[in-house]
Image (cartoon, coloured by chain):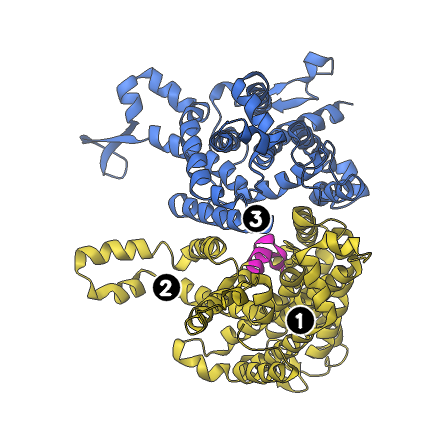
Chain colours: A yellow, B blue
Amino acid sequence: MMTKISPRSDLLMLVLFTAAILTMPIWLAPIGAGYPDLLQKFAIFGLFALGFNLLFGLTGYLSFGHAAFLGIGSYAAVWSFKLLGMNPIPALLFSVVFSSLFAVAIGYISLRRSGIYFSILTLAFAQMSYNLAYSVLTPITNGETGLRVLQSDPRLFDSTSEASGPLISNLFGIEMTGYSGFYFCAVLLIIGFYISQRIFRSPFGMMLRAVKSNQNRMSYTGLNTRPYTLAAFIISGTFAGVAGSLLAVTDPLAGAERMQWTASGEVVLMTILGGAGTLLGPILGAGLIKYFENIFSAYNEQTLHAIFSFLPDFMEGAVVSLASLFVGEGWHLTLGLLFMVIVIFLPGGIMEGFNRITKLFRRRPSRVGKRTGHSHSPASANAAE
Amino acid sequence: MDAIVLQILNGLDKGGAYALIALGLTLIFGTLGVVNFAHGALFMLGAFCAVAFNKLIGLEQVVVDPTKTTAWGTPLETRVPYIEVWLGDTGTTMLNYSVPLSIAFAIPVMLLVGYVMERGLIRHFYKRPHAEQILVTFGLAIVLQEIIKTYFGANPIPQSAPDMVRGAMDLGIWIGFDPGTVVYPQWRIVYLFFSLSVIGGVFAFLQFTTFGMVVRAGMADRETVGLLGINIERRFTLVFAVAAVVAGLAGVMYTPILPPDYHMGMDFLVLSFVVVVVGGMGSLPGAVSAGFLLGILQSFASMNEVKTILPGIDQIIIYLVAVIILLVRPRGLMGRKGVMET
């Protein structure tokens, strides 16, 4: 355990987290990630993974259809733009309302089963939404083309503005692109982090962890666990909805492919990579994946040749052709391999890796007689992080 | 009436594919207790075995004849597949029958893939939670499909059925309808019979051989079988390989119906999982019957008459059925007690 949990350490963590997020444009600049588009993605997917973690990390229910909420949030936000104007605040409210309504409906049904059945039920619901968005619901979702805001839309509050340029979401005059867009997302991420921290420390969070460790025992003590898991599911779905609406705020467009189950798989991977059940892990995982996606998919043969130019010619060709399998178009191959390696060797994710390393250093001085103190389960170690 | 017969037939061939994949999934789940999300990728690998085999025997010999020129003035090139050069007419026939012939190529390949996968990866996940099994096989599925994408490209590669069974057949006359009402592509009938015979083969293998008996015993009570001094794990490895072969063969024969591309496995996987759940986790007859049932339901839902009443129903019918089944009969249609109850 790194620190003892106390209100003070939590506050410190929140302050540090806030500072780290808000200064991201500065300290990420040296590694080539200090530009707004990518930073927005960090914040948005961080929020998405944070929400997913509230369900999977705490209760252990593996939802394979979380991207449905992301898509619903996006659609709700774009509709709010179309009807009410380009202000992001009503868009956020819209997506919160709609994604939580859907989460209630889907969660109520899916949570009747657990384990793999739950995964398949959520997957089924997500696929249903995806298929419907592509076919019958075209009047609402605009099918394959994707939903976008048009000049001719009613836009109740700002239809008077005669700007002829592309429609950009703006918060009382501040345009939600570039750094201002990032800070908007960052503020929501910090709020999300605060909520998730509160949940982790609350009796409600304890209850969810108890569900993860042994649901049967919970039922034997006469406790109905379903309201708790349903609440977690709804909160988690709402987080995803907000993330979806932020995607629409930074770029007013929504498409059905956001709901596809590969997108659900991606958020699972982010959470696992960072460390399910930890506070910071999912955000870290989301950031890493988006960063590497950005870096790796930008590489091509030329850049690889430039990188490996120090090698002798005959080796360079071989190395480049080998490496080019994993970058650019082949980025998904790297992602899949990474996924497998993490699940095989480090199921607790990066945070577990950190814990192992710190434990390695902690153990040295107190080797005598203190062995038993370290034999806690990974779950409790994660919970404290 | 004839429309109904036609829809049932339409559903049967798709149902055959679902049933074959679901059969393999259930086999793996029942024996090894592993939820294999990479099973769709095995189906896809099988389909690409057919593509690879077709490419292999279709390798062409290029002869440049400098005396003749084409209309553009370049020397005339004649391209003849090597196999025709070497074997003459037999070679032509082989090219024509490349899809059925690639079964012989796919079986050893899929056996090897299944064996390596089980020994190399799945074995280490017997004792891990289902969530981790799902995740690791999901990762493997991504890796497999990306590898295929690098070698075969992202576009679908159409394969053709042998000439003899390429056309359509008027099934209606045989069962007393007017000619021209129930016309059905012949290859799909071949596929239906093929899937039925593979299913029959697997059941016979489990039911009538000593090996199958041991496997069934292992499915029922793994520990006791182990206590009797039988190395059950080694047999389960083979079961995994057999399941891989079944999925692969389903893929090979499906290529003339649906041109294979790298993500076809994922599309089928999601549906096959739904099939397994509807049929009942761990029940082989359940998986097979649910496969055919859902295939037929899907084809009925895509009838125009149904679509006008319930628009979009063809897109979601399978998932809808799964949701209802899971809520009403949690164990699925034929699920056994005690298998994955939670």
Q: Residue at x 42, y 62 (%)?
A: A297
Residue highlighted by disc 2: A299
Magenta run includes residue B153: no
Q: Residue at x 68, y 86 (%)?
A: A172
Q: What secondary structure is found at the residue carrying circle 3?
A: helix
Q: Which mark is residue B134?
A: 3
Question: Range of the magenta residues?
Answer: A255-268
User: Would you say A29 lies left or right of A136 here?
Assistant: left
User: Would you say B200 lies left or right of A162 here?
Assistant: left
Relative to B13, residue A8 above or below: below
Mark 1 crowd level (few <14, some 14–19, many ≥20, 10 Å Cα): many
Q: What secondary structure is found at the residue carrying circle 2?
A: loop
Q: Quadrant of residue A100?
A: bottom right
Q: What kind of residue is marked 1?
A: Phe
Please check whether the numbered discs 1 and 2 fall on a single chain: yes
Along the line of sight, the residue nearer the viewer: B95 or B104: B104
Q: What secondary structure is found at the residue carrying circle 1?
A: helix
Q: What kind of residue is marked 2?
A: Tyr
Q: Please, which chain is the residue tagged with disc 2 on?
A: A
- As drawn, the residue found furthest toward the bottom would be A173
Residue highlighted by disc 1: A200
Rendering coords of residue B98 (x, y %): 42, 25
Q: Quadrant of residue A377?
A: bottom right
Q: Is residue A254 visible?
A: no
Work out how far the residue at label 3 is from the one at label 2, CA to CA, in angstroms: 31 Å
